[in-house]
Structure formats: C-alpha cells, structure tokens
C-alpha cells in the first residue's frame, strides 16, 4: 500500500543522517512560514534549510546541524492515484497499518490523515533515544507528510516546537 512505501522512504531518509559533535545552538522562539505544493506550516528558525536535489520541489528538509536528520523536519508531497475522497475510515486503516509496522508507536486518525508518535533507539543511528512525530495529511489527490525528529540530547531545544509545527499544517485552499 502507499502508506508502507511512504513510511519506508521516510525511514530511509532518517537513517541516512548522522549525529555530529556540534556545539549546542541557542534556542530561538521565532518561526518562519513555509509552503510546499500548497501545504503550509510553520518551521522554527533554529532549524536551517538543507538544499535537496529535488528539481520538482516535492520535498523539504530543515536540520539543527548540517545534514543530521536525527534533529530535523522533513516533509514531502506525493500525488495519490484515484479519484476517491479520503475519509476517516481511510485514516483509521492507514493508522492501523502504521501501528502494525511500529507497535510501540501511538497515533490518531483524523478525517484528513494520521498523526503518529514514536520514540526509541535506532541502532543504525547510535545509542541515543530519538523522538519522531509524523503527520500525514491528504487534500484532494495530494498526500503531505511531515516528520519531526529530535534526539534525547536536543529534547530541551526542540520538543517545545513539535506541537506548534504539527498544529500549524494547513492544506491548500
């Protein structure tokens, strides 16, 4: 199903990052408004944009340290096939599939998508606990995915931004 492919792609993106020994940045409270293919959200200015080789502008990445995706916001927009309207039942099915894939995660289904939260150690990325919040939002035939990751060592800096970012997501008008 499309959800499994999407989750696998996002996990691969997350796993490709590496933790660097970089001085801790000073927390900032400012946000910037970001738009991707009509979807908009706020992004803390403490996270800096990373240039992606994405000619069609279907993805964005903002990181705390260079290319370290363990402390980042990654988002993408994908075209969905079919003309069926997305429903709460679709969201519940997608959430059930994600929870089978990530049994230690928690989630919620919405009429326009899914919210999933997970934390744990990823051996590929080290021994540090990583917190992940993922919001999937469907509007028309577009699927917007935003993944906010942060490590235990950056929890104080980044955790306060998760809910404002997730709650700010708006579909195209």
Image (cartoon, grey):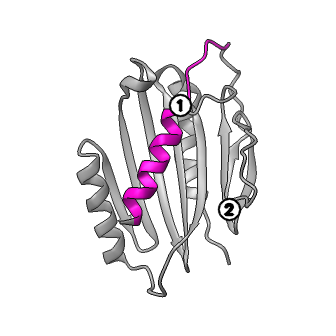
What's the residue at 69%, 20% (across, down)? Answer: 25
* Main secondary structure type of the part rendered in magenta: helix
**Callout 1: SS:** loop
Question: Seen in the image, is 86 located left or right of residue 167?
Answer: left
What's the residue at 55%, 53% (across, down)? Answer: 146
Question: In the rendering, at what x and y percent does residue 46 appear?
Answer: 71, 33
Of the 4 image quadrants, the one containing the N terminus is bottom left
Query: Furthest residue to the bottom?
Result: 83
Vertical side of 156 occupied by 69: above or below:
below
Of the 4 image quadrants, the one containing the C terminus is bottom right
Question: In the rendering, at what x and y percent does residue 150 appear?
Answer: 51, 32
Mark in front: 2 vs 1: 1
Residue 83: say if magenta. no
* Residue in the foreground of this view, choosing between 118 and 2: 2
| Image-quadrant location for residue 2 | bottom left
Distance from label 2 to label 1 (Cα)? 22 Å
Are the residues at dot 2 and dot 1 in contact (C-beta closer than 8 Å)? no
| Image-quadrant location for residue 56 | bottom right
**Callout 2: SS:** strand
Vertical side of 162 occupied by 71: above or below:
above
Question: In the rendering, at what x and y percent does residue 77 appear?
Answer: 60, 63
What's the residue at 42%, 49% (across, down)? Answer: 8
Question: Seen in the image, is 172 located left or right of residue 87?
Answer: right
What's the residue at 73%, 39% (across, down)? Answer: 50
Q: Residues within 10 Å of mark 2 (few under 14, many from 20)?
A: some
Count of numbered circles on the image: 2
User: Residue at label 1?
Assistant: 70
Q: Which mark is residue 40?
A: 2
Residue 20: say if magenta. yes
Q: Which residues are magenta?
A: 2-22
């Amino acid at each position: 199903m499309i959800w499994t492919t999407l989750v696998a792609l996002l996990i691969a993106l997350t796993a490709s990052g590496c933790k660097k020994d970089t001085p801790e940045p000073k927390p900032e409270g400012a946000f910037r408004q970001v738009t991707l293919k009509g979807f908009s959200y706020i992004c803390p200015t403490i996270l800096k944009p990373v240039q992606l080789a994405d000619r069609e502008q279907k993805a964005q990445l903002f990181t705390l340290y260079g290319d370290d995706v363990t402390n980042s916001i990654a988002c993408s927009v994908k075209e969905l096939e079919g003309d069926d309207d997305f429903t709460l039942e679709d969201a519940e099915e997608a959430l059930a599939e994600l929870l089978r894939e990530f049994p230690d995660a928690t989630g919620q289904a919405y009429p326009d998508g899914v919210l999933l939260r997970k934390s744990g150690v990823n051996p590929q990325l080290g021994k540090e606990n990583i917190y992940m919040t993922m919001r999937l939002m469907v509007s028309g035939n577009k699927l917007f995915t935003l993944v906010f990751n942060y490590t235990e060592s950056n929890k104080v800096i980044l955790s306060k931004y998760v809910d404002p970012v997730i709650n700010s997501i708006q579909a195209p008008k």
